[in-house]
């Protein structure tokens, strides 16, 4: 396992303590909002499209929903990642009373991007007409990108040189779903070769925007712990272009190693912060699927009754999954004042982050 030990000067002095631990107290989430997908594709409609493949390979109908718990997944039809993120941010500005002129830094954290160059953040910056001296850049780390963006933003705010950071993402699964359907219809496919593609059908779409600040908070960050096992970087790899995304996943080994890493980090997190599972009223986890969810709660000995879920409706929305679930729970009035919330993220690579939030 690799632990962080990074020191740098950026907007003032910033230190990443040994062991991937950071003190983020005094900072937190000021506002959060999202962009709904344009449409939803059901698991049953995907299997109907693959009926010839299912018949030829004698595959059981209903396996996608049975194995993943994903009933539908969202897609955007004509929107780029920057469009999706910009709509989420615009919703935040119009509905949550955030002044765009107050934003000092924009961080785009999605897996999906408009281009390799320039940054997707530059398109969003222009769409939102942010101040010229508001800096922007892309930060990418698979499904953990948004959580990384929030923790980086909080650290920079504690440095004292900036006050408000807009963290955004915009994920669209449609190119990946389209590619997977074409790949699976290839008559050379066998029951064995086709197995690596099924995880793609759990992927969904969403856009999320949050303002991280040091004042007027919805929720204050209380604890942070990160851990990596980069030897597992080959278990889930994606490539391609904007029109044809490609992803191959060893789902079983990825789940086993990811949750093993999360358990190690949770034990360290609990020991060093003295926060046990009974101290939390809510768990917001990365949304992979039902078996991943159930196995993680069992392995970490967490109370499943405190879980919040979006994967059944939206699918695994990548970097948007955890913040989308947080936003949906907040807007559904699930949180009370002083509730302790544990955000538990796992991302390909493998990386895991635990962040505590006390609702204000």
Image (tube, rainbow, N blue to C red):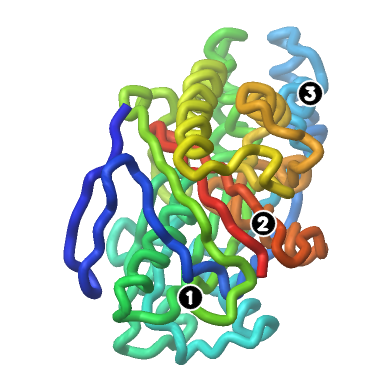
Residue at screen point 30% across, 36% down: 3
Vertical placement of 272 versus 323: above or below?
above
| Callout 2–callout 1 Cβ contact below 8 Å | no
Q: 261 and 84: which one is in front?
A: 261
- The quarter of the picture where residue 88 lies is bottom right
Q: Dot 3: what SS? A: helix
Q: Using the rendered image of the protein, determine whether residue 84 is visible from the camera's viewpoint.
A: no
Mark 1 vs 3, N-terminal side: 3
Mark 3 vs 2, N-terminal side: 3
**Spot occupied by residue 208 in the image (x, y as percentages of width and height):** 59, 63
Q: 340 and 71: which one is in front?
A: 340
Q: Which residue is mark 3?
A: 66
Vertical placement of 346 versus 310: above or below?
above
Q: Quadrant of the C terminus?
A: bottom right
Q: Which residue is mark 2?
A: 326
Q: 68 and 173: which one is in front?
A: 68
- The quarter of the picture where residue 290 lies is top right
- The quarter of the picture where residue 192 lies is top right
Vertical placement of 295 versus 60: above or below?
below
Q: Dot 1: what SS? A: strand
Q: Quadrant of the N terminus?
A: top left
Residue at screen point 65% across, 52% down: 341
| Callout 1–callout 3 Cβ contact below 8 Å | no
Q: Which residue is mark 1?
A: 213
- Circle number at residue 107: none
């Amino acid at each position: 396992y690799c632990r962080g030990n990074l020191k740098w000067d950026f907007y003032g002095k910033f230190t990443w303590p040994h062991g991937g631990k950071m003190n983020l107290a005094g900072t937190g989430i000021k506002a959060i909002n999202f962009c709904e997908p344009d449409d939803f594709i059901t698991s049953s409609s995907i299997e109907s499209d693959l009926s010839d493949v299912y018949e030829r390979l004698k595959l059981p109908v209903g396996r996608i929903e049975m194995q993943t718990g994903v009933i539908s997944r969202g897609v955007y039809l004509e929107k780029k990642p920057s469009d999706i993120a910009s709509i989420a941010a615009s919703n935040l500005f119009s509905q949550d009373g955030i002044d765009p002129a107050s934003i000092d830094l924009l961080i785009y954290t999605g897996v999906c991007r408009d281009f390799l160059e320039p940054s997707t953040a530059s398109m969003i910056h222009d769409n939102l007409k942010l101040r010229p001296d508001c800096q922007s850049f892309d930060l990418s780390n698979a499904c953990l990108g948004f959580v990384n963006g929030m923790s980086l933003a909080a650290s920079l705010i504690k440095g004292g040189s900036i006050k408000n950071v807009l963290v955004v993402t915009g994920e669209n699964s449609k190119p990946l779903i389209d590619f997977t359907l074409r790949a699976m219809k290839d008559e050379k496919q066998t029951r064995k070769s086709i197995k690596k593609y099924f995880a793609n059908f759990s992927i969904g779409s969403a856009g999320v925007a949050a303002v991280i600040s040091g004042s007027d908070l919805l929720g204050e960050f209380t604890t942070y712990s990160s851990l990596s096992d980069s030897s597992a970087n080959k278990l889930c790899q994606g490539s391609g272009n904007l029109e044809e995304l490609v992803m191959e996943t060893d789902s079983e080994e990825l789940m086993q190693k990811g949750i093993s890493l999360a358990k190690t980090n949770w034990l360290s997190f609990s020991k060093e912060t003295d926060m046990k599972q009974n101290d939390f009223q809510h768990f917001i986890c990365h949304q992979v699927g039902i078996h991943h969810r159930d196995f993680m709660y069992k392995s970490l000995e967490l109370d499943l009754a405190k879980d919040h879920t979006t994967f059944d409706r939206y699918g695994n929305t990548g970097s948007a999954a955890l913040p989308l679930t947080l936003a949906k729970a907040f807007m559904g009035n699930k949180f009370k004042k002083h509730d302790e919330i544990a955000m538990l993220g796992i991302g390909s690579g493998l990386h895991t982050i635990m962040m505590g939030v006390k609702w204000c």
